[in-house]
Image (cartoon, rainbow, N blue to C red):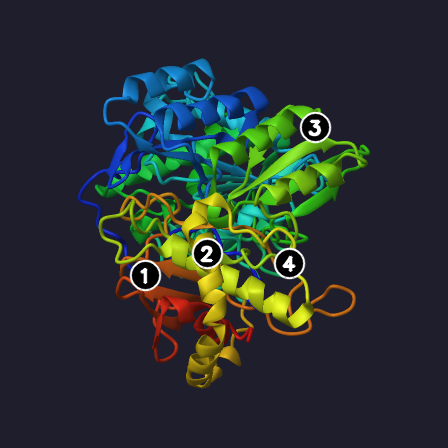
Amino acid sequence: MLAAMPLPPTTTPPGDETPVRGRDDACPGALRLHPADDGSLARIRVPGGLLTARQAEALGRVSEELGDGRLDITSRGNAQVRGLAAGCGAELAARLRTAGLLPSDRHDRVRNIVASPLSGLDGRGHADVVAWVRELDAALCDDTPTGPAGRGELSGLSGRFLFALDDGRGDVAALGADVTLIATADGGAVLRCGGPLPGPGVSPPSGATHPDTAARRARRTDGSDPLGRGAEANTDGAGATSLATDGSMAGGGGLRVRGEDAPRAAALAAVEFLTRVRESGTRAWRVRELPAEHAVTTGGLAARLAGAGIEAVPVEHTPAPASAAPPAPGSVPGPNGRHALSIALPLGRVSAAQWRLLTTLASRGGADELRMTPWRGVVLPGFAPDDAPGALSELAGAGLVTTPDSPWLGVGACTGRPGCAKSLADVRADAARMVADVTRGRAAGTGQVAAGAADTPDTAGASARTAGAVARTAGAVARTVGAVARTVGAVARTVGAVADPARRDADSGHVDTGHVVAGGSPPWPVNGTTSGGGRAGPEPLPVYVSGCERRCGHPGGRWVDALAIGDTAYRVTVRGAGGDTPETDSVDVTAEQLAGAVAAARGTT
């Protein structure tokens, strides 16, 4: 079966090569529209994915009245409107300003902040990071020399620079942000700069030796400390807090700061990055793109924070999070007797009617709030326990994903036709057909259709209309897929590794205007679960359907690559964490055979 781990939000993987940027980034924004084959595209930054019900309603009206009536949620919890007329920019901006969604024109594209979506709602985590989101956003938009960042220069960040505010559960800390804050149990935070949080099966980025390394090592030998904390801070024994051997922040450590200083410290980390960019003479967009000799170092950042009156203590290892799992679809009980509803969006897109339902429920729930997640989902807080099941039933009836066994989970696709001129196929319709095939296979095997997945949502309406014909060809497909399964059998035996959280650029890459996924996280109850709901076997790989060889928005780590090679033909293979190198021979199939070929490659047949 296809249900599996989510397709992760995408970020640039760490590596030894420093990208050479000959231009500023071209990420779309609310003011900088991107021309596409289906009209102009606007990307509206929503820090932390946090919307009031009124703001959500305003977004819906913008989509219906200026765009094509649909909304996309990106891998950074931002909103995207497609099908805009070329001359609508001024009206769009005016509407967004009125709704409080465009507080600063100069900082439109730099307000990229992801935050733990369930923070403050489920009793987990060490802090409610919503206040951090608000304070950091204000710091990013403050141009005054005496502002929270200390210098009015953060409008110079690229549209791809990412902040992550993790409440201590480890969900957004794993997304490879440029600046990450992780709440700690003592009320403080650990500040990290560059790269994903190292964890099981994830190697920290390799780093070259920096010019200040020798001097810092010398300071250790004489018992002193770059921050004046004394000789005990420089030992390398048990419980030590020594810095990374190259002085960079790439090895899993960071700086411990007070919770009240955390948002300002994150803004100052971005200022330090911009300083290093200028010194390097490059146009680096992300922290990990800096040349090794100009990397953001623990000592350099600590000195900047100290100059702003922020005490920062180096830590060698970031506290291990309890779980890196994003919210599973369904009802999430909280400590205050209220429930939050977690919903995934098939292929990250909602229709006008679906969005109206979400905004209506946001008001009905009592919290008057809607949270968009980096896993292309939505969290609705504030429901009474007796009201949650009925609301979930409404959402499922509208074609949204409300249970963790949906075959939509772990399936992603680029924009494809008709929105992208480079795409060879309508990959969204083909991905929806693939999911419909899985749904019908489940029905044939169990006598019932998986909840929330029986009807393909209107984002893939064409697929739904052809599903009957697809089902009638299932026998022929199964016979063809037998050969496919034998070809990729070796792959199926090795799919136990969880995808590396280092990924391609979120909301970007070749102006990637629509890489999407229905979100969620392992473990998902699928074929092979134990009676207690746990995994009985290895986690199936995520799958990504691409319309051309750019594969915009594909995940990192190990993943199943379904690449369009014609209008109705695909090449299926498994790609590895090392440079996207194929791990096995590819198999060419028709669109009708895609479900079986992907299932074989994922090890879920």
Is label 1 in a helix, a strand or a loop?
Answer: loop
The reply to whether callout 1 and callout 4 are in contact (CB within 8 Å) is: no
- N-terminal of the pair, mark 2 or mark 1, is 1
Mark 4 or mark 2: whose residue is earlier in sequence: 2
Q: Could you tell me which residue is drawn at 44 percent across and 49 percent down?
A: 460
Helix, strand or loop at disc 3? loop
Image marks 4 and 2: residues in contact by CB distance under 8 Å: no
Q: Residue 277, position in %: x, y?
A: 29, 40
Residue most extreme to the left: 22
Q: Earlier in the sequence, mark 3 or mark 2?
A: 3
On the image, the x and y values in percent for residue 70 come to 43, 35
Closest to the camera, between mark 3 and mark 1, is: 3
Determine the secondary structure under disc 2: helix
The kind of residue on which mark 3 rests is Gly
- Give the vertical position of 585 relative to 545 (above or below): below
Instruction: Choose between 72 and 428: the one closer to the eye.
Output: 428
The circle drawn on residue 432 is: 2
Residue placed at 45% from the left, 53% from the top?
Answer: 465
Instruction: List the residue tagged with mark 1.
Output: 16
Place residue 71 in its image quadrant. Answer: top left
Neighbour class for label 3 at 10 Å: few (<14), some, many (≥20)?
many
Which residue bears the numbered disc 4?
450
